[in-house]
Image (cartoon, grey):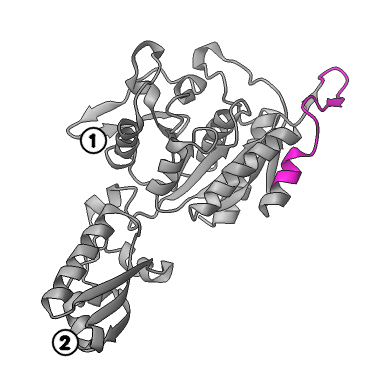
Amino acid sequence: MVNEQKVREIIGQLKDPFLHKTLEETGGITSVSIKEEKKHVSVKVAIAKINTAEQMTLQMQVVDKLKAAGADSVGIRFEELTKEALEQFRGKATEAEAQDLLSPMNNVEFISIASGKGGVGKSTVSVNLAVALARLGKKVGLIDADIYGFSVPDMMGVTEMPVVRGDRIIPVERFGVKVISMGFFVEDNAPVVWRGPMLGKALDQFFRDVEWGDLDYLLLDLPPGTGDVALDIHQMIPTSKEIIVTTPHPTAAFVAARAGAMALQTEHSLLGVIENMSWFESKETNVREFVFGEGGGVKLAKELRTGLLGQIPLGQPDWNEDDFAPSVYAADHPIGQIYTDIGKNIIRSLKK
């Protein structure tokens, strides 16, 4: 029967599937327990990313190696390496790892924009936040991950199509934001009738096959609610900061709480709440009318134990026929200035 030292030697030669370093080099063997009378070995292993197909492959390798060394049964628990441990390897990432947004070696900050229901202006918020961050000098990408209700290209006035070079997709750039959307790959605004596995493959392509370049932030306009596509995205990306969009109406805030709860259950963290359509202000009287009620955003932020990032009033961008983007507010528009302030708060929060 093997002893602890032998177990560490055997497993230590296996490689972390994401860091491509041996578990001995990463310090990935965190504990070993042996019951000699039952010939049972229990090990705890830390790797860069858990709950993946790569983890399952490594698990089978560990079991095979230890059983070949004399163990009758093997128990394995996986955990993620600490952020401090991962930072030691980020600077040593290969070019392929650096391009793979889903690799723990990539330093991009994911910001997911979610809502409990449709019709609250989540995509409008996503687009204008992305543009605001780009105006503040950040390198920004935006994935229109609302597969069934894609709208980002139209909102941003995108008229070009992505270019394919070799096996890489070059995203369209607009207002300093790199954009990819299912809308680019559907003809004549046809409905998307794909089933889950096909959608998952498309989303995986958005992360792995798009030439994003060096990004500070990648924003994801998630599908509304807590359905399969939203859950798949939460499980697909390593980690993200999540913004929940709601209107002031109590019912909208109540439903939006579910989206916040899903983020926490999938081990993502909340960045804050944005209340959209907070009021309408008459240009003639300057009186605010609370068309959809009051208090929803504040109540939701308290319920989710996070902050209220901002309140966006009802209003229309100034349209320019020469540079038409129907949902993007100019930097000097009062609502555009609110988005800039929210962008500054996000940058401060993330310290990037």
Q: CA distance from mark 2 to mark 1?
A: 50 Å
Q: Which residue is mark 2?
A: 1
On screen, 191 above or below 259?
above
Which numbered disc, 2 or 1, marks the residue closer to the eye? 2
- The secondary structure type at the circle numbered 1 is strand
Left or right: residue 341 compared with residue 48: right
Q: Position of residue 85 (x, y in %)?
A: 37, 71
Left or right: residue 106 compared with residue 64: right
On screen, 288 above or below 320?
below
What residue appears at the point 54 percent right and 33 percent down from the top-left corner?
224
Q: Are marks 2 and 1 in contact (CB under 8 Å)?
A: no
Name the residue type under label 2. Answer: Met
Query: On the rendered image, what quadrant is the N terminus found in?
Result: bottom left
Q: What predominant SS class does the magenta segment belong to? A: loop
Q: Which residue is mark 1?
A: 168
**Can residue 21 be seen from the camera position used here?**
yes
Q: What span is colored magenta in the figure?
A: 282-300
What residue appears at the point 61 percent right and 31 percent down from the top-left corner?
331
Left or right: residue 297 compared with residue 86: right
**Can residue 93 be seen from the camera position used here?**
no
Name the residue type under label 1. Answer: Arg
